[in-house]
Amino acid sequence: MPAVEYRGMTLVIPDNDSEWKEYFAAARAHRLILRACVACGRLRYPPSHGCPWCADLGWTWREVSGRGTIHSYEIVVHAIQPGFRDWAPYPVVLVELDEQRGQPTADEALRIVANLVRPDLRPEAEENVAIGKRVRVVFQDLADQVALPQFTLSDEPPAGRVWRLA
Amino acid sequence: MSGLRNRYCIVGVGETEYSRDSGRTTRAMAVEAIGAAVLDAGLGPGQVDGMLSYQLADSTPAPWVAADLGLRLNFYMDVLGGGSSTEALIGLAMGAIEAGMCETVALFRSMNGYTEVRIGGTGARAAQPVRGLDLAQRPYGMTSAGQNFALTFMRHMYEYGTTSAQVAHVRAAHSRHASQNPKALLKERVTVADVLASRWIVKPLHLLDCCLETDNATCLIVTSAERARDLRQRPVYVMGVAGRVSKPRTDFHWAHGPITRVAGYFARDIVFGQAGVTPEDVDVTGSYDAFTFTTMLQLEEYGFCVKGEGGAYVSSGIIELGGRRPNNTSGGHLCEGYTHGMSMVIENVRQLRGTVDDYCPDGREGKHSYDYAPGRCRQVRDATIAMNMGWASPPTGSALILGR
């Protein structure tokens, strides 16, 4: 069973795992792919087997731009997992992708949890993390067929109000 | 949906000591808590014939403890779950009795939440392989409850201007209540400044915004109103119950916003509809305080204030003893001890009986001073309707309205 060691964790992605295997393999090729419904065409994340909107079971993968906006964030100061202690304080961000924002209803969006990292894949400094800032996907290679999508600050102007916890 | 209103009762409550060093098994603690609840109810040998428990692979199943108590069961089930299980299982107990499967159900939770399996995901839980849906969060260092909920809390601050100082009032209020509770693990009163000065865990949570992992067992006994009449205690009636009500996209609730909305948005009409009352009619609340923020989020979502004004509500004095509608008068998970919700229902049962176990010399017999100074009384005068709001996570929760 393919397994990857990362920060003291064993990430297990079995061959029969049709949710994640191709997602992480595409990330290793530095492409962010999401599930798309073959019936209604809408994208969804995380990878799943039925369409949340039309319940059709047919799906395909589709590449997205990897550009988005920080919708919320947190700063982990006290790391729980031992492998993250040398990384703390580190930011976890909820990124809202540009594709399908506010669709099919105003409160829905493609949102992904990741770390906000610098281009060298170290955690971004806390003072640079804020809701409303623009980000783009980068990839942290872990193994032959596995990379973690991460996000880094982009040079685009912010989308809406920028706010961080003082 | 009011067909079962006031037809079922909680007739017995019991718990072990709250500690961080139980020195015994979850089986031993469960037996003590259930035994105490049976005694409290005044039930005779063999009169409990149903059992429900909830756990996270960290406890002892019902059949083992039933044997210790000399009980032959007509119904039992051990359910996977933590917070929000208590209220949901009270509803399931009513359903099992209504279906004729059994007559009286003991519902328990037993855990060495500090010395064996820690809730925060440290120790044994941190070492488990990461697979399936966990791959969407845990590789990013997002494991514990606080880490899982903090994105919701931070967005609430952004959208509504909620401040750390406002929610710190939840801890201050619950610590005041705990100072009147001989059972409480943390009896010392703390201030808003103490909360803000405590170290960061995961921003926006300080250490004192978080509850404390605890070793304990708790038990409630549910039976029909008809049988309750012959038992020892004044019955406490179930007016309404909602169990594990969920937001859309529970696989990854961030997909369906607003992410500051929690499950109570969908549960409130179910529970208030059954009970036939409104938030204004409720005298005491038990809003699950795994964190200061969870108490605040649920109180606003269930309609005790306007959505977004939870920060103002919890810092207004309303939720303190002596205020209009005290919350978690035992000190709750933040100060009394962490039980995955059961202890807050136990507290509300005692409030409605008028027999809270405070420092009043005859408090357990219903004689209270209503002096809310430290080390004195924590009984709410004439408490008639109480509500519990159970929290599993932002998208899943349960609720219960009790009356006397």
Image: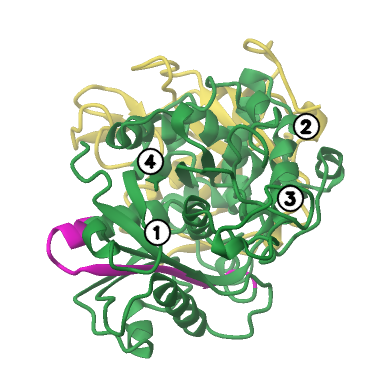
Closest to the camera, between mark 1 and mark 2, is: 1
- Colour assignment, chain A: yellow
**Residue B65 x %, y %:** 38, 83
Q: Quadrant of residue B77?
A: bottom left
Q: In the rendered structure, the residue with mark 1 lies on which chain?
A: B
The residue carrying mark 2 is B165
Which residue lies under the disc numbered 3?
A: B175
Amino acid type for the residue under numbered disc 4: Thr
Q: CA distance from mark 1 to mark 4?
A: 39 Å
Residue B248 in view, yes or no: no
Residue B196 magenta:
no
Report which colour depicts chain B: green
Quadrant for the N terminus of chain B in the image: top left
Labels 1 and 4 touching (C-beta < 8 A): no
**Label 3 vs label 1, nearer the camera:** 1
* Left or right placement of residue B350 versus residue B97 in this view: right
| Residue range of the region highlighted in magenta in the rendering | B95-114
